[in-house]
Image (cartoon, rainbow, N blue to C red):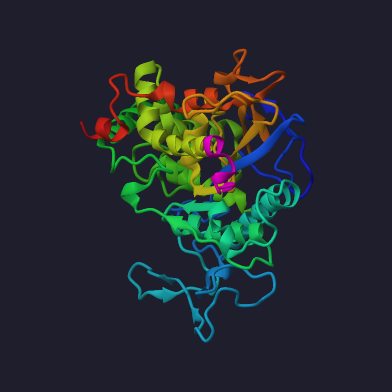
């Protein structure tokens, strides 16, 4: 992460990939606005690819990625600044871990210490998430005092932490928490994880079969659009990728190749020169984005709303409910910060839902921040249906977002379009997406 202070910008469509600097791109709000609560939704840190690709290219990508030294001991996976066994029960043995690789027509072989599993959070990814935690602490603990400087047991309800069930997101959140709570925390907050069927940080076709049908529809549309365009690069890609032509639907799939390229670049591993072609990389990026997320941007407005509602509607309802509780209950609501650790699909979907998607793949460690402010001069009564005097600011990485749905007069702070009224924010991500016959999301998913 860049340690230099960045200059934030305000735009309806972000320019970057959601990268977070040490400053968070934070800009002071108008003087009469008080910060009440913050929610951060993040992608995990840098990881290895989920497939082995380009291992016979020139130069070849490594068959084994020796970038996971912090994970070589079970029970001590969080990197230590001090070298002490913080959180490790006294007397618990350190069990070394090595990856066993299978080689065709040969006996399995143990790899070297520090070798990674496919899709595993690397040492660099751990450091990225620690730095993000430190940046969040500098702003929201040291400067804004949302949380006490030394978190104790009685402060547990002020901080909400949740991750998807995958090890790379859980470990990313563990590393972030180390940076957030600092070395003098009296207690370590707990991380919540949901069963896969109950997960809402990702589109969940297992829970919503109708969503799965729509996802496949748009994946098929992307195949028809992009496979002919990708064929132009067969002679470039196939010799580097074991003879596989770049295609969305033919194995090995384009998404796995693109993922490998992104992981290699993030770790400073050189790609074959012919794959550095910006035109080719953009085509690959757009092809996979449309394959996975095309439904969010359906040209049919009813279908677009349905897709968004079933994909991430439950997540946004939860986020809005969190802000609504803080607005209606005031200080009786103890929560001050929520951190949700998800994936690239989480952030791409959320930016689509806010109508600010820039068709660029999120960086490792990318984040979407949502801040709730209160106008201390407002005296209008507040209800769950109408919350005057409350504003939401969204920031993708370091870039403030002026949400298109908040641009009308009365829907944002005068002269500051990035400060959306809480009522307008809820209208964008919840009210406009409601089923026309009043069905719940789960009813619609299973009907």
Magenta stretch, residue numbers: 326-337
Residue drawn at the location 43% of the way across and 44% of the way down: 201
Q: Nearer the viewer, residue 58 or 353?
A: 353
Q: Quadrant of residue 100?
A: bottom left
- 189 displayed left or right of 290: right
- 143 displayed left or right of 403: right
For the C terminus, give its image quadrant. Answer: top left
Residue drawn at the location 53% of the way across and 62% of the way down: 65
Q: Position of residue 302 (x, y in %)?
A: 35, 18
Q: Position of residue 304 (x, y in %)?
A: 39, 22
Does residue 203 lie above or below 101 as drawn?
above
Q: Nearer the viewer, residue 56 or 27?
A: 27
Q: Position of residue 297 (x, y in %)?
A: 44, 23
Q: Is residue 15 visible?
A: no
Residue 124 magenta: no
User: Which residue lies most toward the top here?
Assistant: 409
Residue drawn at the location 46% of the way across and 45% of the way down: 257
């Amino acid at each position: 992460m860049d340690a230099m202070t960045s200059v934030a910008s305000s735009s309806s469509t972000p320019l970057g990939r959601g990268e977070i600097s040490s400053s968070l791109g934070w800009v002071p709000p108008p003087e009469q606005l008080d910060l009440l609560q913050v929610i951060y939704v993040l992608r995990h840190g840098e990881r290895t690819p989920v497939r082995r690709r380009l291992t016979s290219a020139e130069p070849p990508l490594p068959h084994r990625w020796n970038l996971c030294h912090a994970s070589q001991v079970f029970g001590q996976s969080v990197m230590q600044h001090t070298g002490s066994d913080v959180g490790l029960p006294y007397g618990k043995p350190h069990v070394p871990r090595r990856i066993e690789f299978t080689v065709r027509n040969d006996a399995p072989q143990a790899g070297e210490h520090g070798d990674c599993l496919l899709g595993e959070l690397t040492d660099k990814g751990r450091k990225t998430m620690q730095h993000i935690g430190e940046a969040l602490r500098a702003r929201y603990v040291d400067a804004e005092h949302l949380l006490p400087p030394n978190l104790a047991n009685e402060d547990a309800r002020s901080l909400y932490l949740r991750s998807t069930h995958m090890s790379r997101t859980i470990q990313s959140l563990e590393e972030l928490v180390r940076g957030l709570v600092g070395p003098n925390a009296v207690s370590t907050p707990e991380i919540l994880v949901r069963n896969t069927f109950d997960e809402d940080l990702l589109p969940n076709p297992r829970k919503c079969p109708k969503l799965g049908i729509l996802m496949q529809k748009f994946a098929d549309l992307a195949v028809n659009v992009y496979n002919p365009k990708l064929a132009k690069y067969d002679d470039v890609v196939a010799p580097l990728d074991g003879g596989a032509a770049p295609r969305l639907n033919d194995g090995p799939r384009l998404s796995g190749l693109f993922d490998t390229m992104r992981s290699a670049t993030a770790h400073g591993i050189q790609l074959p020169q012919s794959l550095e072609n910006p035109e080719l990389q953009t085509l690959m990026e757009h092809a996979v984005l449309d394959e996975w997320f095309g439904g969010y941007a359906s040209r049919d407005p009813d279908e677009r709303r349905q897709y968004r509602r079933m994909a991430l509607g439950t997540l946004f309802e939860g986020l809005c409910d969190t802000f609504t509780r803080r607005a209606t209950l005031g200080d009786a609501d103890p929560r001050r910060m929520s951190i949700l650790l998800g994936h690239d699909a989480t952030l791409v979907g959320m930016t689509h839902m806010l109508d600010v998607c820039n068709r660029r793949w999120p960086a490792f460690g990318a984040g979407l921040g949502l801040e709730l402010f209160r106008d201390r001069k407002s005296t209008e009564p507040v209800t769950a249906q109408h919350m005057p005097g409350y504003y939401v600011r969204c920031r993708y990485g370091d870039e403030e977002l002026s949400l298109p749905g908040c641009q009308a007069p009365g829907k944002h702070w005068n002269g500051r379009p990035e400060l959306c009224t809480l009522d307008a924010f809820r209208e964008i991500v919840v009210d406009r997406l409601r089923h026309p016959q009043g069905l719940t999301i789960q009813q619609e998913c299973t009907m």
